[in-house]
Amino acid sequence: MTVSTQATTHLNPKCIQPSHVPDELVVDFDIYNPPNLQQGFHQAWKTLHAQGVPDIVWTPYNGGHWLTCRFKVMEDVLSQYETFSSRIILVPKERGDEYHILPTHLSPPEHRPYRALLNSGLSPKKINAMKPEIERTIAGLIEGVRERGECCFTSEIAAPFPTRIIMLILGLPPEDGPYLKEYADQVMRPDGTMTVKEAEAKILEYLTPVIKDRRETPRDDMISCLVNGTINGEPLPDDHAYQLCVEVIVAGLDTIVNFMNFAMLYLAEHPEQRKLLTQNPELIPAATDEFVRRYGLVVVGRYVEQDVSFHGVDMKAGEMVINATFLPALDERINPDPMTVDFDRSNVEHTTFGAGPHRCAGAPLARVEIIAALQAWLARIPDFEVKQGATPNYKAGTVGSMEDLYLVWDPKATTSIEPSAA
């Protein structure tokens, strides 16, 4: 079975189709270069919902692996951790072997105490206490570009905003954020200039003196909370402390940046929806939830621990199953008219933040950041559009991304609101 309708250039050669994989389950789909990617990241993946495409398929790219396409099969894979473990979460498996950051590659019960440490540092209570600082940060960034009438939203707003917030949470100097983000990007979307291990090593090199300092003199920050925590009553080993901190940095400096790009592109291209939110800011939290459903970005793998017949498909131990966690939200069997953004949508089901024990610990923080960003931007710059001729560039990877979103507006039609009053 062929999904793609246009030839694509693949960095990885096709592998041989295993004898237990039937021809009707084979698709021509490279997760790092899906067909017609520049026509839209989600549209490219949506081809896996075409008529006749099975709920589970197999692709020969990136070492060969399974792909879940629909809600139920993906939810089951992400929840059945004894069969589908997190020991490897990336393909090809050679690359996945390089990525071992706690607690991502662990399954319960080993996973639980590490996750508890992360949860304590990202609790709703702590995030709510940070709301004034979050609002001041985004307001200051927007005020910095408002009178210019244009900006690269990606580099001037979307990237620095969550970067500054996660640095604040961790207790690190904000000016070091771009340095860490450079290597976080290489972990999530390596461009070939370095390996994942080399990128992680750069982050760990930076963290080593910080962790030593926090062990000796704890502060009121997340790094102190993590490195002075205990696992099953025992002090956290240095290498585990490093990995937990890397996990927070990589997650906090990447996903939300790209999500904000997609939400703002939608508002730039849909003036009627933008006007609705501008005139009714109380709708922004509901709009945020709909954007979360519509524009998920994370792709995560699971390792098949033993031979299994899963939803009628025979899988072998050692194989990989890749799950684009945003596909269930785009499944018309689950959410009617799923590609349409509907702020009044109800009874929504999605796995944007994952499912099962590895559901994203940073989900509450992400929601607060998105709401704050939309409120601050629309209050100051109610009308804007994509700069003529500046077409965003889409990239696929462990986290889908959009590069260089340029927005323009009439400075005279904006409102100055001091950050302190935001």
Image (cartoon, rainbow, N blue to C red):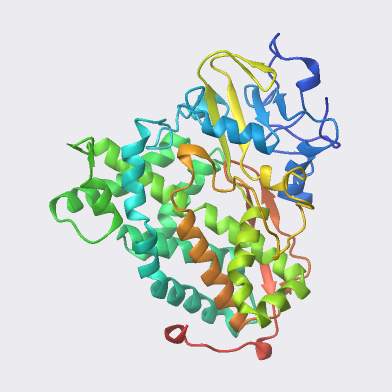
Residue in view at x 42 percent, y 65 percent: 164
Q: How many marks?
A: 0
Q: Is residue 414 left or right of 1 when viewed as pictured?
A: left
Residue 92's spot in the image, x, y percent? 57, 26
Residue 95's spot in the image, x, y percent? 51, 29
Residue in view at x 63 percent, y 87 percent: 414
**Taking the image as drawn, is residue 404 in sight?**
no
Q: Is residue 403 left or right of 54 when viewed as pictured?
A: left
| Residue 364 higher or lower than 244, as above or below | below
Q: Viewer-proximal residue, 211 or 20?
A: 20
Residue in view at x 30 percent, y 42 percent: 242
Classify residue 107 by image quadrant. Answer: top left
Classify residue 152 by image quadrant. Answer: bottom right
Residue in view at x 53 percent, y 57 percent: 256
Q: Is residue 279 left or right of 4 when viewed as pictured?
A: left
Q: Looking at the rendering, in which quadrant would you find the N terminus?
A: top right
Q: Residue furthest front?
A: 347
Residue 350's spot in the image, x, y percent? 63, 47
**Taking the image as drawn, is residue 323 in sight?**
yes
Q: Is residue 204 left or right of 59 when viewed as pictured?
A: left
Q: Residue furthest left?
A: 216
